[in-house]
Amino acid sequence: MTTPSFGSTLPWAEPSWYTGRPSPYYKESHCRLRDAVRKWCDEHVAPYTEEWIEAGAVPPELYQKCAEAGFLVPIAAGKSIPQEWAHYPIIGGIKAEEWDGFHDFVLWDELVRGGRVASIFIGLVVGAPPIRQFAHKALQDKILPEILSGQKRICLAVTEPSCGSDVRNLTTTAEKTPDGKHYIVNGAKKWITNGMFSDYFMTAVRTGGPNSGAEGISMLLIPRGEGLRTRPVPVIEGGLSATTYVTFEDVKVPVGNLIGPEGAGFRQTMVNFNHERLWIVFQVLRGCRMAMSDAFTWALKREAFGKTLVEQPVVRYHFGHMGRKVERLQAWTEQVVYELEHLGPEAGARLLGGVTALLKVESGLVSGYVARECLKIMGGLGLTKSGQGSRIEGFYRATPSFVVPGGSEDVLIDLGVREALKLHKQAQKAKAKI
């Protein structure tokens, strides 16, 4: 599809299809969504971002405005919106049946560009899918209307202080009461994004014995209430994501809040990881483009040694390397989105789990490279939290948040190789049977 040029004309400031160049992936509805999200964010988010950062929080009432504008349903859904959610508003007037993985990509690309509002949706991104995919209908009918309308908020509570990426060894326990009607939950979770303002905690718990491994893990929806305490965890990126330490002390939860059968929690968590990792890549791409745009704007006017910075070959050299890395990451991301769009959930998880892990690793490496190069081009301004270098300073500070969440770099590289070898062995066995 060929579209009119949209947005900045600075090199690599926008995806190539924004500039009017043809693409096989995007159609009119993607353009409509892009335009609608950018307009909404420019009006409701961008003017207030610095104020929110200073305050360390986004005003609670903005979340309801986002619900009314039609953000929550596509954010909770990811790459496809169920027809039963069609009565909720969807930003850009996109129909539920036409929503696809590229709409999801465009939505996040523009949300990240619009300012720091994207951080308040993280809990919804990772907390809602287990309800949609695995919960029984009665629980779906109760919880989904609350979170899709913005009345209540949800987060995912998996990571623990002692196990990090080693989900198999989590220690938070959920033991049934003698009458079998409730679970009693004890333990702690750490680095839980959006936990400070969440009403529901989609929690990975151990329902099996202490040595039950992955097969002893279940997913349990825990409402905020007696015995559940939260406190903020200060992180390098700042307070807008409301990173949280959660403790459970004899928390009583109805057995009806179990997501799927007992023992299925580890598999449910792994299914959700693919989208979480891809969603991190979406954020990286727009963060890189914003940083490069600001660095280019500065290099075009800043003079040193009798020339503007951009007239210096060494500066153009750095821009060229940034540009090729970002466009390479964009192309790989679009390929993965396309493949996921044309594979069923099971085939997508089987064939692309390792690929998505490596893609997420690459995004972390690219974000670190671009942040460093842009900061050097900006000089002292790149260290400043306000003014022309503020977005680059913020992006530089945020890069660890793209590397660690969703699985650490070393763990994901190993996963990518193991998954590739597994597919190789499966293909060899299939050939041997012919």
Image: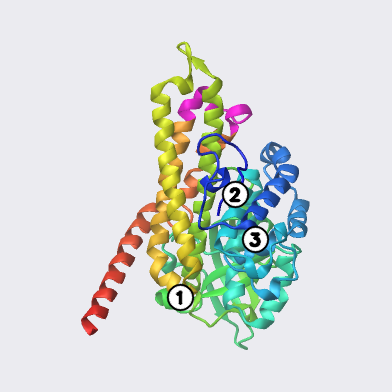
Mark 3 or mark 2: whose residue is earlier in sequence: 2
The residues colored magenta run 375-390
* Distance between the alpha carbons at the discs numbered 1 and 2: 34 Å
Label 3 is placed on what type of residue? Arg
- The quarter holding residue 106 reads bottom right
- Circles 1 and 2: CB atoms closer than 8 Å: no
CB within 8 Å, label 3 to label 1: no
**How many labels were placed on the picture?**
3
Q: As shown in the figure, which amino acid type bears the numbered disc 2?
A: Thr
* Of residues 171 and 434, the one drawn nearer to the viewer in this rendering: 434
In this picture, is 190 found above or below 395?
Answer: below
**Tag shown at residue 346:** 1
- Residue 367 in sight here: yes
Residue 318 quadrant: top left
Q: Residues within 10 Å of mark 1 (few under 14, many from 20)?
A: few
Specify the farthest residue to the left.
432
The location of residue 232, given as percent across then percent down, is 62, 50
Above or below for 316 versus 322: above
Secondary structure at numbered mark 1? helix
Give the mark toward the camera: 3 or 1.
Answer: 1
Check residue 3 in the rendering and tell me which mark sits there, or answer none: 2
Left or right of 44 in this view: 425: left
Q: Residue at x 53, y 36 (%)?
A: 291
Lower position in the chain sequence, tag 1 or tag 2: 2
Q: Which mark is residue 229?
A: 3
Q: Residue at x 41, y 63 (%)?
A: 166
Q: Amino acid at mark 1?
A: Glu
